[in-house]
Amino acid sequence: MTRRASLWIAAVLIAGCASAPPRPASSAPPALPNDLKWTRDSAEYHALVLQTYRDAREHVEQAAAGRARGTWAVSLDADETVISNLRYPLERGSQGMGFSSESWNAWVKRRQATPLPGAAAFLARVRELGGRIAIVTNRLGSECADTEAVFKAHALAYDVMLCRPD
């Protein structure tokens, strides 16, 4: 009996030392980088964007005082200043892919960028005060019409949009 118990204990110990079978490849999407998670999920990001636009509005209101309508302007970048493209890196990242010119161009053509919190109200206030609005973007000229369509779809006021040559 002692011998049988010893063999059983030895078998258990040997089995415990054996390597575990390989785990099947995970079908879970890759983990998102912290910056994308924070931008997507945090109340702080949303609050900071609103605060920035509130501060900009106050500054514009002071600067516009006493100036004739149409004699002054503001200039803003489009991407991640007026419109958010967060969905693009989220989609690419969930597929384990990064940026490519082709996928970016396809994203722009989808016209799914959304206004950042406070952007529409700020632009409307600039217009109300008599200012002009120039949107400057590093987007290609061939992407400009789609970018303008996003602005129009979301009632984002602007007077001129400057895109870079293809």
Image (cartoon, helix red, strand yellow):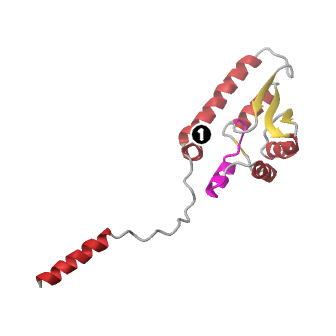
Q: Vertically, is 71 above or below 105?
A: above
Pick whichever, 123 or 11, lies toward us.
Answer: 11
Outermost residue, left side: 2
The percent position of residue 73, horizontal first and vertical second, equals 81, 23
Residue that appears at 86% across and 22% down:
70
Mark 1, residues whose alpha carbon is within 10 Å: few (<14), some, or many (≥20)? some
Outermost residue, top side: 66
**Residue 152 in magenta?**
no
Quarter of the image where the N terminus is located: bottom left
- All told, the count of numbered labels is 1
The percent position of residue 6, horizontal first and vertical second, equals 17, 78
The percent position of residue 126, horizontal first and vertical second, equals 77, 28
What residue is disc 1 on? 46
Q: Vertically, is 95 above or below 73?
A: below
Is residue 4 rendered to the left or right of residue 123? left
Outermost residue, bottom side: 1
Q: In terms of image quadrants, where is residue 161? A: top right
Q: Vertically, is 93 above or below 53?
A: below
Determine the secondary structure under disc 1.
Answer: helix
| Kind of residue at disc 1 | His
Quarter of the image where the C terminus is located: top right
Is residue 60 rendered to the left or right of residue 127? left
- Magenta span of residues: 81-97
Residue that appears at 66% across and 49% down:
89
Q: In terms of image quadrants, where is residue 94? A: bottom right
Pick whichever, 80 or 28, lies toward us.
Answer: 28
